Amino acid sequence: MESTILSRGESGRHHELVDMVCAYIKADPARKVTLADLGARFGVSPFYLQKTFVEVMGISPRRYLEECRVTVFKLRLSRGEPVLVALRGAGYASHSWAYKDSRVKLGMTPADYKAGGRGALIMYATGDSTLGRMLVATTEYGICAVDVGDDDDELVAALGREYPNAKLAKSRRAALLLEGVNRHLRGQSVRLPVDINGTDFQLRVWMALQLIPLGETRTYSEVAEMIGEPRAVRAVANACGSNPVPLIIPCHRVIRKDGTLGGYGLGVHRKSALLAKETRPEKA
């Protein structure tokens, strides 16, 4: 029987190969590329490349390419490009892709997603929190962004980069939602409507995160198992890093297998503080 245990050198070479393939795909997701093309470019057989990629990433190169294309498509829509132009720019030859499963891939139709950038009103508020200055942004449907930092101007500037074609305005509604997030952080039961978009994989991860009970953690591997993709550990970590509403969707409850915290978009020191508060509420 063939052993699946890799030496440290073999593991390093596998990761190096996969990192190069990922960089190549991300550089131009619109490029037409097959498994045979990738194998020829990197000097390995298609079978070896597929096997190694799945071992490291937990998903196939084709699935990774799809995730990258969805990201490019969303970015082009947010910049105001017509749907068909955005589709071609992301590498899709037919418009049927976007409309067949668009609510799964984008969270809404392409036209609605595009409208979420150009001409849309994003309401926001800033205020104090136990983690620092906090910004909460909302559409008419729900919270679309939560961020924490040290400076209000920097938080608002980051929101503007996320929604470059939207109109940003302070609002009382956003201020009430910010207070709701603060109450949530204090352990109170609060209904916080969200309006977020992601790929089908990201949405599945974010849904799984909400099943992790208060005061508990899960490893990236365990979350991958929760969504039925046990090999997709790195992809799960990427989805956690893409979470637009941390604090509401608790990606801070996901840690590494060795018990270390791993990364966190709001800063590892804030991740540590959140976990300490949740596991030892009497000391919060």
Image: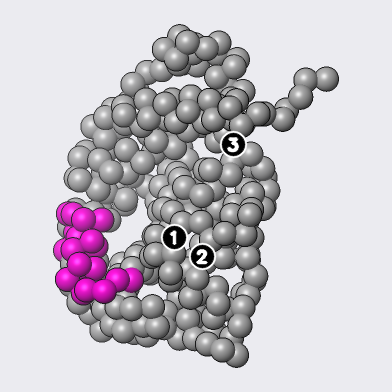
SS class, disc 2: helix
Q: Is the Cβ of the residue at disc 1 closer than 8 Å to that at disc 3?
A: no
As measured in the structure, the alpha-carbon distance from the residue carrying label 3 to the one carrying label 2 is 21 Å
- Residue labelled with disc 3: 58
Relative image position of residue 171 (x, y in whole percent): 23, 79
- Residue to which mark 2 is pinned: 252
Q: CA distance from mark 1 to mark 2?
A: 7 Å
What span is colored magenta in the figure? 148-167
Closer to the chain start, of discs 3 and 2, is 3
Q: Is residue 79 above or below residue 39?
A: below
Identified at 28% across, 43% down, the residue is 75
Amino acid type indicated by mark 3? Gly
Looking at the rendering, which quadrant does residue 193 occupy? bottom left
Q: Quadrant of residue 279?
A: bottom right
Q: Residues within 10 Å of mark 2 (few under 14, many from 20)?
A: many
| Residue plotted at (47% across, 68% down) | 271
Q: First in sequence, mark 1 or 2: give its number.
A: 2
Residue 160 part of the magenta-drawn span = yes
- Callout 1 amino acid: Tyr
Return the residue found at the far right.
Answer: 1
